[in-house]
Structures are given as C-alpha cells and as structure tokens.
Image (spheres, rainbow, N blue to C red):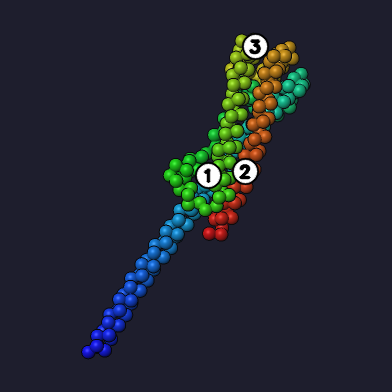
Amino acid sequence: QKLNYLMNKQKNALRYIVEFLVIVTGVTVSFWGEEYRESLQNDEEEFKALKNLQIELDEINTYCEERKTSYRKDHDVLSYLLKNPDNAFDSIDNLVQSSLGIGFALNDYREFQPPMNRYNSIINEGTIKFIESDSVKQQLSELHNTLYAYLKSIVDDEKLIQQKLSLYLAENYPKVILLEKYDTEKKSYYNALSKAVNNDEILKALIYTKYRKMGIKNYFLDGYEEKLIELRNRIEKILINQ
C-alpha cells in the first residue's frame, strides 16, 4: 500500500511537471510569436516610413534644382549689373525674357519652401521611431532642421534687404520702378537702371548687399543638396536590403 502511495505520488508529480512545462512552453511560444509578429509589423512600418521619405526626397530634389536655376540667374543679373553696368546688357539679355526678369532679381526675393509634409507627418505621428538607422535619423534632422533653418534665415535676411532696396528705388528713382511695372522694353529699362547705379553709391551698396546674401544662399543650397543626395542614397540601400 505504501508502495502504491509512492507510485501515485510520483505520477502526480510527473503530471504536474508535464503540465507546468506545457504551460511554460505555450507561454514562451506565444511570447515568441507575438514578438515575431510585432517585429514584422515594425519592419512594415519602417518600410512605409522610408518609402514615404524617399518619395519626398525625390520631390525636394526636383524643387531644389528649380530653385538653384532661379537663384543663380538672379545672382548673375546682379553680378553683371554691379561689375559693368555700362556694357552688361547683352549678358543680362541672355538671362531674362523681359524687364520684369531684371526687376525681379533687384526688387523681389525667392522663398525656400521644399515639400516637407511627409517628413512632418512621420514626426508628428511618431512613426519615425520605427526607423532603426540612427544615421538616417541624424541626417533627416540635419537636412530638415539645421540646413533648412540656415537657408530660411538667409532668405529672411535677403527679404529685409530687398525691402530697403525697393523703398530706396521708389523714393529716389521712381522712373526705374515704373518702367518695370509697365514691362518696358528691356533695353530702356536697363539703361535707366544702369544710369542710377553709376551715379549712386548707396544704391550700388544696397544691390551689393543683396547680391552677397544671394551668394550665401546659393552656397547653403549646395550643402543642402549634398546632404539630400547622401540621405537618398542611404535610404535606397536600406530599402534594397529589406
């Protein structure tokens, strides 16, 4: 009887052990399964985030190429005007289609507002956490925060100078302003403008100040594009390897 008792006790103990192992195994497998499912979901979210960024970076690249062309054209117009106002008309004539093109370089400014809706959404929704690459996150911050802030600041500075320049022209050379307004033949507009520049050191200094800011803006745009290309290539490699 004692032997039967011991055998039954061993059987019960073995059953409890087996049941315990089954429960532990089930919990472990369930945990692993959930972890694997979550990993797959995170990978999918990362892929979507990176793909959206890749699409937007392509759009930004197209935007920057257009900005670069316009920025440099405006910069060249002022360069010719400052260096040789008496004989620069032919060079400027090849750059712009009308007197409005000359006037725009002088009296206006061009904004820098690249498309950033996808990036902002990724930040606001918190899905940037799914991007595992710290390098990509760092480069995104440099592109959309640091370099973008530099460019915006320079554009704002140029805007202030442009306002002073436009006001000075309106007060001292209204004929130049009015000739541009009525889209006068380029040669007549340029002759009036070059005459004003030749005879007024303050006007020339204001134009030079704007010209200098435009040069700095072009310099930082080049740096922005370099970071953009570097980031695009890195994201492309990650997407290929996923």
* Circles 3, 2 touching at the beta carbon (< 8 Å): no
Q: Real-space Cα distance between discs 1 and 2?
A: 14 Å
Report the Cα–Cα distance between label 1 and label 3.
44 Å
In the picture, measured across the screen, residue 218 lies left or right of residue 26, that is right
Viewer-closest of 5 and 240: 5
Q: Position of residue 49 (x, y in %)?
A: 48, 50
In-image side of 12 versus 130 (left or right): left
Residue that appears at 36% across and 67% down: 27
Q: Which residue is mark 3?
A: 173
Whichever of callouts 1 and 3 sits on the residue coming sooner in the sequence is 1
x and y, in percent, of residue 90 in the image: 74, 25
Mark earlier in primary sequence (3, 2): 3
Look at mark 2 in the image and give the residue it sits on: 227
On residue 67, which mark appears?
none
**The disc labelled 1 sits on which kind of residue?**
Glu
Question: On the image, which quarter does residue 20 sit in?
Answer: bottom left
Secondary structure found at label 2: helix
Q: Quadrant of the N terminus?
A: bottom left
Please indicate, yes or no, whether residue 106 appears anywhere in the rendered image.
yes
Q: Taking 23 as reference, is 137 above or below it?
A: above
Judged by depth in the image, the label closer to the viewer, 3 or 2, is 2
Read off the residue under disc 1. 56
Q: Around disc 2, counting alpha carbons within 10 Å, would you say few (fewer than 14), some (14 to 19), or many (20 or more)?
A: some
